Image: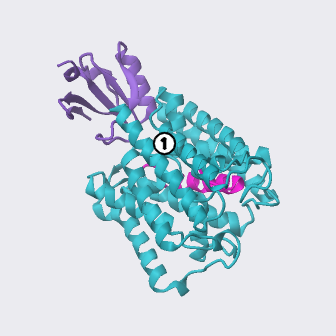
Chain colours: A purple, B cyan
């Protein structure tokens, strides 16, 4: 299913989200954090490319993968 | 998912705007069905924190918003006690936000309700609010952060809602402990049960939808997202329709209820509120909701707003509806904006390191 490839990263600051999106490139996009996820900052980054842990930094909080109707943690600092 | 969120926000906005019009018809001051700044100020007066006789009343709307949001967050597992993200800075920012709101005469929610009542001074306020949010977004995009919040105990998270319950039980059981205005805006209020019910409903809905007056404009600036602004627009539409239907719509700059036509100070007052709200992560209403959800950082922001309200009235910094801003209010507001800019600059520098 196409939506299974969707991942979302949450951050400790909006700046962290901006920098992550820049490093990810491609279709990575800034979006509001979904209601079901908890986060320090209201901006998240949604992307479909492979998650690469080297693209994270100390501002990256967690990365989730869409699993049918819920988000599953695949990486957490 | 996004359109469902927009639908819920639109419903919450309509509920809030309609409830505000009804509360005004039932006795609240004009265009003041809800005003987080004014109502925290009235509550501060009732608690003897300031001595301005015309603005003293424990506003049940505030109690309802906090308890409605608290109950909903516990039921839906959104209750997440956290804290430690620059609490003292948040107190200071909350204090300055309140000074800005009381120079303008209203929080962002009342600004929208004033717009819906035809008060064009609120349009000047909206320009200032938008400019303040824009400035805040520049800081956010440059690295501004107040630091990470850490997990706290359930007791820490429940302390603020518990305090709210204690205050309201005392208010009902021993009203002689509190001050009540006999004239002025503080004496004008809807029946307590109606105010409490309206507050509960808005608290529940705002908790579920993350309704925020500043967040909508911020998200447009930062991520071109129009979800949160839906609530803002719906409150305006509902209050405009309600005021037109009830004959309470009066277009103009002068003769507006609890309002003044000093444009520069309306602009600057709401500029401070916009900038401060972005720094805090939400408008005064959102701070109440976050505090109810267990954020002790937002509790500090709310306490800062209460202290700011007390100072605004004890030191004559709040504007008067007929005379406009005071000299002290102008000085405090300009100093407050400089302090906000200094905090934002220093925290931006720290955030980039």
| Rendered view: A47 above or below B187 | above
Decide which of B303, A77 is in the foreground and name it.
B303
Decide which of B265, B138 is in the foreground and name it.
B265
Q: Which residue is mark 1?
A: B231
Task: Classify 10 Å Cα crowding around label 1: few (below 14), some (14-19), many (20 and above).
Answer: many
Tell me which residue sits at (76%, 60%) in the image: B321
Place residue B37 in its image quadrant. Answer: bottom right
Q: How many marks?
A: 1
Q: Which residues are magenta?
A: B85-108
Residue B11 colored magenta? no
Image location of residue B318, percent across then percent down: 72, 61
Q: Is residue B146 left or right of residue A50?
A: right
Q: Main secondary structure of the magenta part?
A: helix
Q: Is residue B18 left or right of residue B52?
A: left
Q: Quadrant of the N terminus of chain B?
A: top left
Place residue B81 in its image quadrant. Answer: bottom left
Callout 1 secondary element: helix
| Rendered view: B196 above or below B108 | below
| Chain identity of mark 1 | B
Tell me which residue sits at (24%, 31%) in the image: A64
| Rendered view: B128 above or below B162 | above
Tell me if I can see residue B227 in this picture.
yes
Image location of residue B143, percent across then percent down: 50, 32
Place residue B162 in its image quadrant. Answer: bottom left
Q: Is residue A18 left or right of residue A49?
A: right
């Amino acid at each position: 299913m196409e939506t299974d490839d969707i991942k979302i990263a949450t951050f400790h600051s909006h700046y962290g989200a901006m920098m992550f999106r820049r490093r990810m490139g491609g279709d990575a996009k800034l979006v509001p954090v979904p209601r079901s996820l908890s986060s320090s900052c209201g901006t998240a980054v949604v992307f479909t490319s492979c998650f690469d842990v080297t693209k994270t930094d100390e501002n990256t909080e967690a990365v989730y993968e869409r699993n049918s109707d819920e988000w599953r943690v695949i990486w957490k600092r | 998912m996004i359109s469902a969120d927009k639908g819920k926000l639109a419903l919450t906005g309509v509920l809030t705007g309609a409830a505000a019009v009804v509360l005004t018809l039932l006795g609240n001051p004009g265009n003041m069905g809800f005003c987080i700044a004014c109502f925290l100020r009235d509550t501060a007066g009732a608690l003897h924190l300031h001595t301005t006789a015309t603005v003293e009343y424990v506003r049940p709307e505030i109690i309802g918003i906090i308890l409605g949001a608290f109950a909903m967050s516990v039921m839906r597992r959104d209750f997440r006690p956290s804290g430690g993200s620059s609490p003292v800075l948040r107190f200071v920012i909350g204090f300055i936000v309140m000074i800005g709101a009381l120079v303008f005469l209203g929080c962002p929610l009342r600004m929208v309700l004033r717009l819906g009542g035809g008060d064009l001074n609120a349009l000047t306020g909206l320009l200032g609010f938008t400019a303040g949010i824009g400035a805040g977004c520049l800081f956010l995009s440059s690295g501004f952060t107040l630091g990470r919040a850490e997990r706290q105990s359930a007791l820490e998270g429940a302390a603020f809602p518990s305090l709210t319950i204690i205050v309201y039980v005392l208010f009902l059981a021993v009203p002689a402990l509190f001050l009540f205005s006999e004239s002025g805006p503080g004496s004008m209020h809807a029946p307590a049960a109606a105010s409490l019910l309206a507050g509960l409903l808005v608290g529940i809905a705002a908790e579920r939808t993350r309704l925020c007056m500043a967040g909508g404009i911020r998200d447009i600036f930062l991520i071109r997202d129009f979800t949160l602004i839906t609530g803002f627009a719906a409150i305006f539409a509902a209050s405009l329709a309600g005021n037109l239907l009830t004959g309470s719509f009066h277009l103009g700059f002068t003769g507006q209820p609890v309002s003044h036509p000093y444009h520069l100070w309306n602009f600057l007052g709401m500029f401070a509120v916009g900038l401060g709200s972005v720094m805090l992560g939400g408008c005064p209403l959102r701070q109440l909701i976050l505090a109810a959800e267990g954020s002790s950082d937002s509790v500090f922001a709310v306490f800062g707003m209460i202290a700011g309200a007390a100072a605004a009235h004890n030191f004559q910094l709040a504007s008067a509806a007929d005379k406009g801003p005071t000299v002290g209010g102008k000085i405090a507001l300009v100093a407050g904006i400089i302090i906000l800019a200094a905090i934002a600059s220093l925290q931006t520098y720290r955030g980039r390191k």
